[in-house]
Image: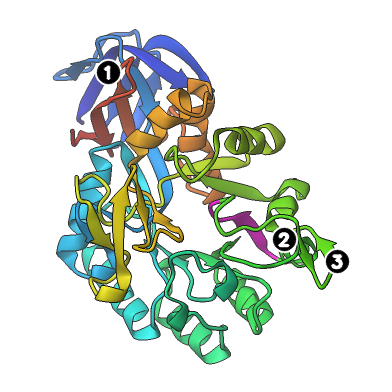
Amino acid sequence: MKYTLIENGKLFVDRRIKKGNLLLCENKIAQVDFCGELPENTKIIDARGNYVSPGFIDIHLHGGGGYDFMDCTPEAFREISRTHLENGATMMIPTAVSSTLPDILKLFETYKATISECPNFYGIHLEGPFISKNQKGAHNEKILRDPTDEETRILLQEGKGIITRVTAAPELCGMESFAKAMLENGVHLSIGHSDATSDIALDAMKHGFSHVTHLYSATPSVRKINQVVKAGVLEAAYLDDNTTVELIADGKHAAIHALQLAVKIKGVDKVCLVTDALRPAGTDATESWLGAKVPENRIIIEDGVAKLPDRSSFAGSVATVATVLEKGVCHYGLSLEDTLTMLTETPAAIMHLANKGKIKDGNDADIVLFDKDLRVKNVFLGGEMVK
């Protein structure tokens, strides 16, 4: 059997940081705080005082390295996987921007053909097309639509075992039937790009919507409707104790005090940090595309964030999980322990990822080493050093 010892590290274990050693056996964590006689031919990695964390988990990203998942090519999938893996994402959920049904089915086919080469992928996240036109953000309004029973049937048939999460607006016509079918097939439902009032959102939370996509982005708060003040998705997320939320912690999408408030109200058990990374993540591009490379999908990158060309809306981030780690501590003022929890343990729990998100005997040997300046130095995926 193949053994690897990571010694002289600062281990993030049980939400605390402590000095210690970590023994890996094949693709599993064999023993935390190993101090016995090493098995023969054990490979020794000197952490040199760097931090040793569970691999980071990003449940919302669209692309990176110059590629988007909607390119629907094996090359795109491999390059996105490599770009984010080298930055510490040992598990990620490829996310589709709102698209036509044929394009979504093409995405499924590419996923099936490529998953053996991308072991750090966990299914597909459909962000749209069943979202509100009033809260579309950078999504193409012409593609947005209400769900139908026929399209739902096709999605579940062709995406069986592939669709792991869906972001949708619960106020849309046909959503009750759609949500029921998705839940029956084990799909994680999230409210996002929704114009729902708090009444509608809270009712959806009682009926299977358990998460809110990128809180503070297309998740409206209090406003007047027909001269009546109504609360929105934001307040519903805070009121429902069981609902989890994600925030784009790139230093741009979420204001400092807003993110701190979410963590204070919900707690680190209910908040995970995501990138919502687009095609230019991990590159120095100044122009790019959201989804397919067509003129109507053009975006610009300035001030460290992707925007629509008219600057009317952010289009997504250009962050990696390494960026989120640094921003969590240095920009948002979170403790290192809380930041790591929201990058590892919490997203694993939200998506019911067994054996992920914690340094624990028997868990998968997905490990990230980073230095005192929060720079990722080494990455292990299934016990293999990939950086």
Between marks 2 and 1, how big is the CA–CA gap?
43 Å
Q: Which residue is mark 3?
A: 228
Q: Comparing marks 3 and 1, which lies closer to the viewer?
A: 3
Between marks 3 and 2, how big is the CA–CA gap?
23 Å
For residue 289, side relative to residue 131 (left or right):
left
- Region in magenta: 208-214
Q: Which residue is mark 2?
A: 205
Between marks 3 and 1, how big is the CA–CA gap?
60 Å
Q: Comparing marks 2 and 1, which lies closer to the viewer?
A: 2
For the residue labelled by badge 3, is the local secondary structure a helix, a strand or a loop?
A: strand
Q: What is the x, y in percent for residue 39?
A: 22, 17
Is residue 162 among what the camera can see? yes
Residue drawn at x 61%, y 33% is: 257
Residue drawn at x 23%, y 23% is: 4
For residue 131, side relative to residue 357 (left or right):
right
Quadrant location of residue 384? Answer: top left
Q: Earlier in the sequence, mark 3 or mark 2?
A: 2
Decide: is 386 above or below 178.
above
Res 6 label: 1
Q: What is the x, y in percent for residue 22?
A: 34, 19
Q: Amino acid at mark 3?
A: Val
Q: Nearer the viewer, residue 285 or 383?
A: 285
Q: Earlier in the sequence, mark 2 or mark 1?
A: 1
Decide: is 347 above or below 41.
below
Q: Comparing marks 3 and 2, which lies closer to the viewer?
A: 3
